Image (cartoon, rainbow, N blue to C red):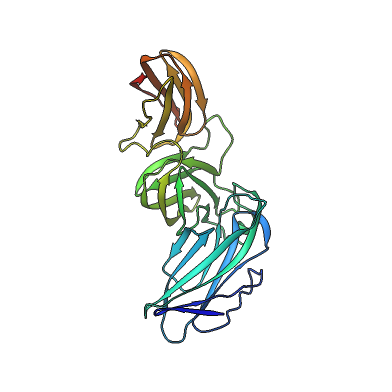
Amino acid sequence: MRVIVGCIILTFLFCAYSGAQCAVSGDPAVAICADNPNQNSPVHYTINTSDTAAAVDLLQVYIDQVKRWENHESTADFFLASAPSTAPHRVTAVAHDTSGRWFQSSISVTTTGATYTCTGQQIQGQTPHSMNICQPADGEIHYSPVHLAWWPLGASSTPAKVVDIYIDGVRQFHQPPFNGSPYNSLTDMPFSVGRHRITVQSYDSTGTFNKTIYMNVNKIQIGCAPPTTLPDVNFCGNTLSGVVYVKVSAASSWGILQMKAFIDGAQVAATNHPYFDQVVNQPAGSHELRIDVVDNGGNHFSRSQTVTVN
């Protein structure tokens, strides 16, 4: 079915669920396919287009009418996270061509659960001496904090154990060979609103290997924007009645291993994430909110702020 609105042609296609084959019918037209209508997040999507009159120069994906992905390409194959839900998500692919036409198609996908590490499907066939960034997707649009998952396959076809993460060219995570905890291939990091370049880099006996992706952060959902200097803590909690709003984010060139929150010298919270976003009952008046941080390099730093409870 085609609906013509002004000079915009919208072609609606309901594609079969197949990552390997994603057939397009019509011209211009776009088709989006998922491997299965019921699966865990992140979901594997394939997008194909047909346009004989002009070149397709932009693809977008909306989940439940919220834009979640965008890239300048004519076909796409990627994994995109969505919240687990018993109700199906409406997933829409929108294409734009160089003549100014927009066209779209939609499917329904139910995410029955979530996987936060790299899935077997994402790393299947990965060549040695290569990095795979499994989450977020290149071109993803998401809120902060951002969940990152990666798989560094060394030259010997075994996972490399030293990893650096650079955000806009600045290192903000380092996984040393031995830091008192098991090797991790995932983390959560606070981001500022805007477009960011993410590079995950590792090392093996033959040298350095890395991968770079770009994503857009559209809002800060938990915690604060990261501090602009490293290492540091950013406080962004509002003054509230009857409570201290412990709303902070921390960052270090090593990455954050643990944070503890203290009010007037008494510990009130602890986390292995680089952020807090919670309230603590306190009487009216001024209080000292102190955040003690340990990073992945074993370095300790502390920041304090005077907060007022109404």
Question: Can you give x and y, in whole percent of width and height, for residue 82 in the image?
Answer: 57, 53
Residue 35 is drawn in which quadrant?
bottom right
> What residue is at 51 percent from the left and 84 percent from the top?
27
Residue closest to the far left: 229
Residue 296 shows in this picture: no
226 or 170, which lies in front? 226
Question: Can you give x and y, in whole percent of width and height, for residue 134 in the image?
Answer: 54, 54
**Residue 181 drawn above or below residue 219:** above
> What residue is at 51 percent from the left and 47 percent from the top?
148
Residue 286 is drawn in which quadrant?
top left
291 or 153, which lies in front? 291
208 or 235, which lies in front? 235
Question: Can you give x and y, in whole percent of width and height, for residue 24 in the image?
Answer: 57, 79
Quadrant of the frame with the N terminus = bottom right
Q: In the rendered view, does 29 fall on the left or right side of 16? A: left
Question: Can you give x and y, in whole percent of width and height, for residue 22 in the image?
Answer: 61, 74
Q: How many labels does the image show?
A: 0
Q: In the rendered view, does 155 fall on the left or right side of 216? A: right
> What residue is at 62 percent from the left and 73 percent from the top?
15
